Amino acid sequence: MIETLTIETRGKGLVDITGALSEVLERAEVQQGLCTVFVQHTSASLVIQENADPAVQRDLQAFLERLVPEGDALYTHTEEGPDDMPAHVKAALTQTSLGIPVIGGRLALGTWQGVYLWEHRRAHHRRRVVVVLQPVS
């Protein structure tokens, strides 16, 4: 089964998509297999991260902002604004695709794990995330 989700973002930050993925899994009725998640953009990414303490997300965002700042004189791709090239670098440093095992009809995430779309641009965006469920017997 393949389904494309549209995820609304509010600018830079992590958006928890775990629930949306679980709903796709429930509709597909896959009990055992693999859930592959892919974001169809070059300025956003996917991560599995802690879902209990929001400070983790703030700290990750702050760290990546320091690591890849806006306005670096090395950037030559500047036509789409000062946050665009840094967003591409951030997406390259993180992930655009994740593979998550499915066990007993659920994503096999750890107790404190959630799946997040990480928006790297300042503005609101509608991001497409493709979900592929591959059942195994």
Image (tube, helix red, strand yellow):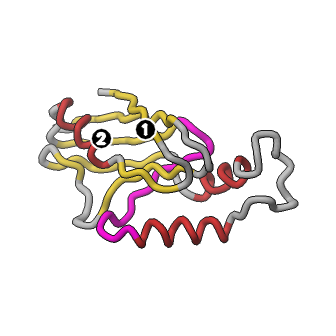
Residue 114, magenta (yes or no): no
Going 29% across and 27% down the picture, which residue do you hit? 1
Type of amino acid at the residue the image marks with label 2 = Ala
Say the numbered circle drawn on residue 50. none
Q: Can you tell which mark lies on residue 7?
A: 1
Which is more toward the observer, 119 or 90?
A: 119
Residue in view at x 63 percent, y 65 percent: 65
Residue designated by label 2: 20
Sort mark 1 into few (<14), some (14-19) or many (20+) by Cα contacts within 10 Å.
some
Q: How far apart are marks 2 and 1 (CA)?
A: 9 Å
Relative to 104, say whether 47 is above or below: below
Bin the neighbour count of mark 2 within 10 Å (Cα to Cα): few under 14, some 14-19, many 20 and up: some
**Residue drawn where x is 37% and y is 35% of the image:** 131
Image x and y of residue 21, in percent: 29, 41
Spot occupied by residue 24 in the image (x, y as percentages of width and height): 26, 35
Q: Where is residue 116 in the image (x, y as percent from the top left)?
A: 41, 52
At label 1, the amino acid type is: Ile
Magenta span contains residue 53: yes
Tell me whether the residue at label 2 lies in contact with that at label 1, contact meaning CB atoms closer than 8 angstroms.
yes
The front one of 82 and 73 is 82
Image position, residue 67 (x, y; %): 67, 69
Q: Is mark 1 on a helix, strand or loop?
A: strand
What is the total number of numbered labels drawn onto the structure image? 2
Which quadrant of the figure has residue 34?
A: top left
Q: In this view, does 56 lie to the left or right of 136?
A: right
Helix or strand or loop: what does disc 2 sit on? helix
- Magenta residues, as a range? 40-54
